[in-house]
Image: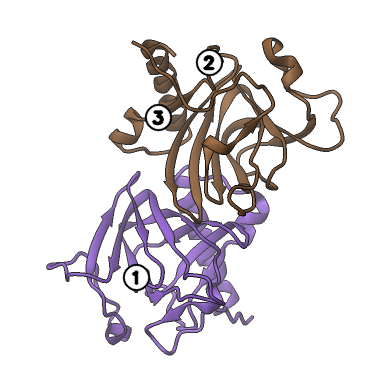
Chain colours: A purple, B brown
Amino acid sequence: MKFDEVNEFRKRAGKMMNAAGIVLTEEESRDIEVADMGLGRLAKEGLELVTYINTDRYCAKELVILPGQTCPEHRHPPVSGESGKQETFRCRWGEVWLYVEGERTEPMQASIPQASRTHYTVFHEIVLKPGEQYTIPPNTLHWFQAGRQGAVVSEFSSRSRDESDIFTNPHIRREPVISE
Amino acid sequence: MKFDEVNEFRKRAGKMMNAAGIVLTEEESRDIEVADMGLGRLAKEGLELVTYINTDRYCAKELVILPGQTCPEHRHPPVSGESGKQETFRCRWGEVWLYVEGERTEPMQASIPQASRTHYTVFHEIVLKPGEQYTIPPNTLHWFQAGRQGAVVSEFSSRSRDESDIFTNPHIRREPVISE
């Protein structure tokens, strides 16, 4: 990722959290994580987030999905004998379309990112508007996209181990590489 | 607690969450928990809350502390071999004064509720403004009060077992009793 691009997406995410009434400290604003998953097409596939707390017992994050962005399909497998990450998504602002394993929803609201279309394989749709939430069981494939305005989503979960996530797209690297 | 009083506090808490930009579903608004801890003086000692999710691994709640209200001193002990509840308080709106074990802060901002003053024993003050957070270790005595406007606080934690909480005041019953 280019430094300027990261900065631009960070600013856009900060503005959206602000619109949602979410207050961040200066340090949190400066450090908003911009994840392009190593795909180099942040406008299409990626996510912005702030991790408030991540202990060996629980985790809480604020996620921003910008208009047009999709968080690629993945699952949270068991690690070291501990069940995979279980997570609850609560929509705070905007609208988010979440896809999980189960009966295919037709027609669905999201547009699958064309450059990666074979790496999206689950199509059971859950629509979340502000105040609505959904809990994703451990080790369940899921991906999500926001509605026209984007979305801000609170994630409450068991311990987060991003480095263990299994993405359907084998080209994805969850850890960021930032260049000047 | 009288039904009318519960209703009044529920409404006030709902308004404060609204001011904080927190969106609740209709059902959540109707069911805001009003906890007087069995003391019968809700304006002085009590709390309003919405539990978003509570699994055997993690829990997330939205807490409202109305102006003048104090959440009485308590701790979360180990249960069935599991370490006590660990919790992170993140102030979303208003200002909250949290007291934990440690060096006494003098002068402190909170006024100790006079009817229960002997049941407050820890006075190390943590001030949280919007965007600020603090993590309370398991089994640590703590209590909290809001500033002049009240406060809305997100609580992220390990599993919540309210019925196991140990309050310093032996008259406290955490489970509510509501009369017509």
Crowd rating for badge 2 (residues with CA inside 10 Å; few <14, some 14–19, many 20+): many
Outermost bottom residue: A170
- In terms of sequence position, does the residue under pointer 3 or pointer 2 come before the other? 3
Q: CA distance from mark 1 to mark 3?
A: 31 Å
Residue carrying label 3: B32
Give the chain of mark 1: A
Residue carrying label 1: A143
* Amino acid type indicated by mark 3: Ile
Relative side of B28 to B111, left or right:
left
Residue carrying label 2: B42
* Amino acid type indicated by mark 2: Leu
Crowd rating for badge 1 (residues with CA inside 10 Å; few <14, some 14–19, many 20+): many
Residue A87 lies, in percent from the top left, at 43, 60
Residues tagged 1 and 2 counted as in contact (Cβ below 8 A): no
Give the chain of mark 3: B
Q: Going 26% across and 75% down the picture, which residue do you hit?
A: A122
* Amino acid type indicated by mark 1: Trp
Residue B175 lies, in percent from the top left, at 48, 27
- Quarter-of-image position of residue B146: top right
- Quarter-of-image position of residue B14: top left
- Quarter-of-image position of residue B32: top left
Q: Same chain for labels 1 and 2? Say yes or no.
A: no
